[in-house]
Image (cartoon, helix red, strand yellow):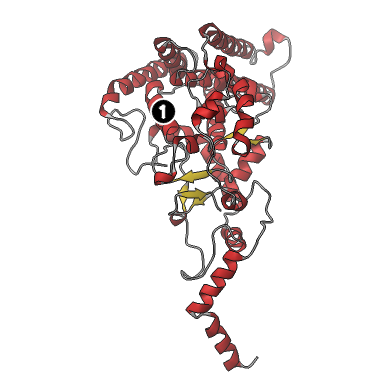
Amino acid sequence: MAPDASDAHLRSRNTPAAKRAQKQTLESSEWVSQRGHLETSAPYAKAYEEPPFTLKEIRDAVPAWCFKHNTLVSLGYVALDLAMAATQFYIATGIDNGWNGLIDTSSPLVRFVLWMIYGVVQGWICTGIWVLAHECGHGGFSANTTLNHCVGFVLHSALLVPYFSWKITHSKHHKNCSNVDKDQVFVPSVRSEYPARVRGAEQAVPEHSKEEEEEGDMFESPPIFDLLRLVRQQIFGWPSYIIANRQKFDVWASHFHPSSPIFDPHHARQVIMSDFGIAIMLGVLGCLAHKYSVMAVVKYYLIPYLWVNHWLVMITYLQHTDVRLPHYRGDDWTFLKGALCTVDRDFGFLNHFFHHITDTHVVHHLFSTMPFYNAEAATKAVKSKLGKFYLYDDTPIFLSIWKTYRNCKFVEDEGGVVFYKR
């Protein structure tokens, strides 16, 4: 083609009419994503529908007995978890001396491995204790409010969780789940927070199109960077959330400060009580470190504590982050829509340690005061009613969190119903 003809051709493609035609062609053409079904939100965004049922209709599908509390059963779970934790602790006291010579643990490597195993297993158990205290905060532990608060306060304080403070903000999460403007947990970033894509402002790139997916592939983070960020999230995500919550607020939003923007003025006494519980536990740990050694506290308490933080962040992140989940703004959000923006995940045998908060979370968000030990039966009851609106994933959890972190980067700055993109 001659140079002047080529220039004319390019000019014709850049006219407003040509751009409009290009946009219409892109929007009208049928396109099927070549990514895996959990690697792109495109098919879910295109097929989005509003739920055709009401919350009452879902509740009517659940047997009435699922909503009845049995305090003795709940206390039995607490006793079982505490007994398992005490047993683990007792067994660990023999690691350094080989259980009085029963086995040879003189090798530092052997002792290190045994202490790591203790930390992992004790982390599973203490995560279960964490979940029980969480149920107390919801009223799903007992019909007796005073008992809920007493048990929850003791258990959460022992795990350095400000019980009442976190209970308040967690309630706000449940009341505003998947509301981009009001939710406080795993609120998605928006496109404008990411570096601008290298394309002209007038270039037509329809949402959830082939062109947009190719654009996302071109500018996605190197895997090693995402891996480091994911590790940072799993280690520091929980402490940074309760200390500052920079994810949602531009000012210091601490769970330990009565004047924090996450609280109302009448919450001040509850925040102070929560701080008092944490202060007592830190004092206990300080006394133990003084009497036995700092390293003893690290081995028996800190390592399991870090594992609890990891599981807590992993569980909540995977429950509320997925390419299939919409997020809402303004009048497009309702409580029912938000509650359904939850994924039940199969954590394998850990489901039992975690009291099935992992694979019954949809029901938990629909009916948060339901006794946790009835959530499995309730989940089975609502599946047929929810149909395609019930989301479940049995992908191995570490693979699942990697795929989710890689594919759920941001949502659009505007729009009443938005999905994750990368």
Report whether residue 118 is seen: no
- Residue 421 higher or lower than 110, as above or below: below
Q: Position of residue 163 (x, y in %)?
A: 41, 21
Q: Residue furthest right?
A: 103
Report whether residue 315 is seen: yes
Of 336 and 78, the residue lying toward us = 336
Asked if residue 90 lies left or right of residue 235, the reply is right
Q: Position of residue 234 (x, y in %)?
A: 54, 36
Give the number of callouts.
1
Which part of the image, by quadrant, shows the N terminus? bottom right
Mark 1, secondary structure of its residue? helix
| Amino acid type of the residue that numbered disc 1 sits on in the rendered structure | Ser
Asked if residue 104 lies left or right of residue 135, the reply is right
Residue drawn where x is 64% and y is 40% of the image? 400
Of 132 and 112, the residue lying toward us = 132
- Residue 219 higher or lower than 331, as above or below: below
Q: Residue furthest left?
A: 265
Q: Which residue is mark 1?
A: 171
Q: Position of residue 279 (x, y in %)?
A: 37, 19
- Residue 212 higher or lower than 261, as above or below: below
- Which of the 4 image quarters holds residue 255? top left
Mark 1 crowdedness (10 Å alpha carbons): few <14, some 14-19, many ≥20: some
Asked if residue 154 lies left or right of residue 271, the reply is right
Of 303 and 94, the residue lying toward us = 303
